[in-house]
């Protein structure tokens, strides 16, 4: 029987691949046969991810998405060297938690630039003629923060809500080129981002984490669960799914 998810020979660009969820997605996609182009700022992290991959032909391109003016050249180089893409997964993301009184225009701009504007620009560049194969599938890492309010979370939350809105608009417009676009909204995932959150919020036993766990009643999510969802969304098995935000949140958005 043919497996439901088979990425054999599919060229996929994965951003945020130097650690965390992006690394987990990279490793899984390589096991499913994909040929990967990885990016993030940290070259050491990228090299380490590449060393964990199965298969041949993977490449990496250190790049800083806080400089959107460089994305045109970056995308041109990746697509010229790797050939047209079959998939793109945008895992790049930053958090800058501040109360509203400290949420300056500069802070808003910084978070929106990396989490949202760079994503839009990368899709704009990669959906140019000759840079993608028909049926290209795009998945972006959003967050349940897109749906819910929380103290000191405004810039991140707004950036992810913007991403989900961008995905719906891209889906409508890019369907005529055969491109599907979706996002994934994880709850708390066991990565450096979560460990940093614990450090700043009283640790695992602290009231804030315990409050979260009452809502995310299935427990903290392992990065492999997000990788499974991403594999489905970029595979032909999801070919009629576009413009959605898929929660992978251990039940958080159900209560
Ligand atoms: N962990 C969670 O609980 C959780 C929950 C919901 C959603 N998410 C989302 O899932 C995605 C991945 O999260 P994660 O937990 O894996 O985060 P992470 O461990 O902090 O990884 C973030 C990735 O983004 C890259 N990155 C950050 N700033 C960059 C920049 N300016 N230019 C290029 N690359 C940059 C980092 O690499 P370099 O530092 O090497 O550049 C790293 O590879 C994010 O979009 C996050 O918002 C995470």
Image (cartoon, rainbow, N blue to C red):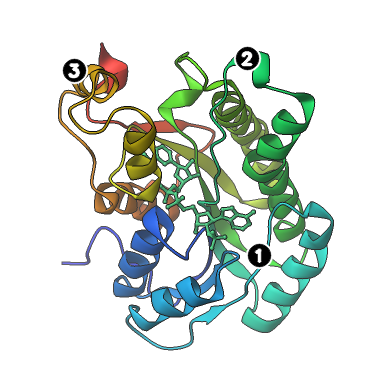
> Dot 1: few (<14), some (14–19), or many (≥20) neighbours within 10 Å?
many
- Mark whose residue sits in front, 2 or 1: 2
Quick one: SS at disc 2? Answer: helix
Query: In the structure shown, which secondary structural element does the residue marked by tag 3 occupy?
Result: helix
**Disc 2 C-beta below 8 A from ligand 1:** no
User: Which residue is at 46% across, 71% downward?
Assistant: 45
Q: Is mark 1 within 8 Å of ligand 1?
A: no
Specify whether residue 34 is in view: yes
Label disc, if present, on residue 132 of the rendered structure: 1
The local crowd at label 2, few if under 14, some if 14 to 19, many if 20 or more residues have their Cα within 10 Å, is few
Residue 51, by quadrant, is: bottom left
Q: Is residue 252 left or right of residue 43?
A: left
Direction bottom: furthest residue: 56
Q: Where does the image place residue 216, in percent across and percent down from the top left?
A: 23, 24
In the rendered image, the vertical position of residue 124 relative to residue 162, given as above or below: below
Return the residue at label 2: 100
Left-right relation of 190 to 89: left
Image x and y of residue 198, in percent: 32, 35
> Could you tell me how far apart the alpha carbons at marks 3 and 2 are, in whole angstroms?
26 Å
Of the 4 image quadrants, the one containing the C terminus is top left
């Amino acid at each position: 029987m043919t497996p439901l998810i088979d990425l054999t020979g599919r060229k996929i660009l994965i951003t945020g691949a130097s650690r965390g969820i992006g690394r987990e997605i990279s490793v899984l996609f390589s096991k499913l046969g994909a040929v990967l182009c990885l990016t993030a700022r940290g070259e050491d992290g990228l090299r380490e991810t590449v060393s964990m991959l199965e298969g041949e032909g993977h490449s990496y391109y250190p790049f800083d998405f806080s400089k959107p003016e460089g994305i045109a050249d970056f995308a041109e180089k990746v697509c010229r060297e790797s050939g047209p893409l079959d998939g793109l997964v945008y895992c790049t993301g930053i958090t800058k938690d501040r109360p509203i009184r400290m949420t300056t225009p500069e802070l808003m701009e910084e978070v929106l630039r990396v989490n949202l504007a760079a994503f839009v620009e990368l899709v704009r560049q990669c959906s140019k003629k000759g840079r993608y194969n028909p049926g290209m599938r795009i998945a972006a890492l959003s967050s349940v923060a897109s749906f819910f309010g929380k103290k000191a979370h405004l810039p991140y939350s707004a950036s992810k809500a913007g991403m989900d809105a961008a995905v719906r608009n891209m889906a409508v417009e890019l369907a005529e080129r055969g491109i599907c676009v979706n996002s994934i909204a994880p709850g708390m995932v066991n990565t450096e981002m979560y460990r940093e959150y614990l450090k700043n919020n009283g640790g695992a036993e602290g009231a804030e984490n315990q409050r979260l766990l009452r809502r995310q009643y299935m427990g903290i999510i392992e990065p492999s669960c997000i990788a499974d969802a991403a594999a489905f969304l970029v595979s032909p098995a999801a070919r009629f799914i576009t413009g959605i935000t898929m929660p992978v949140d251990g039940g958080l958005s159900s209560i």
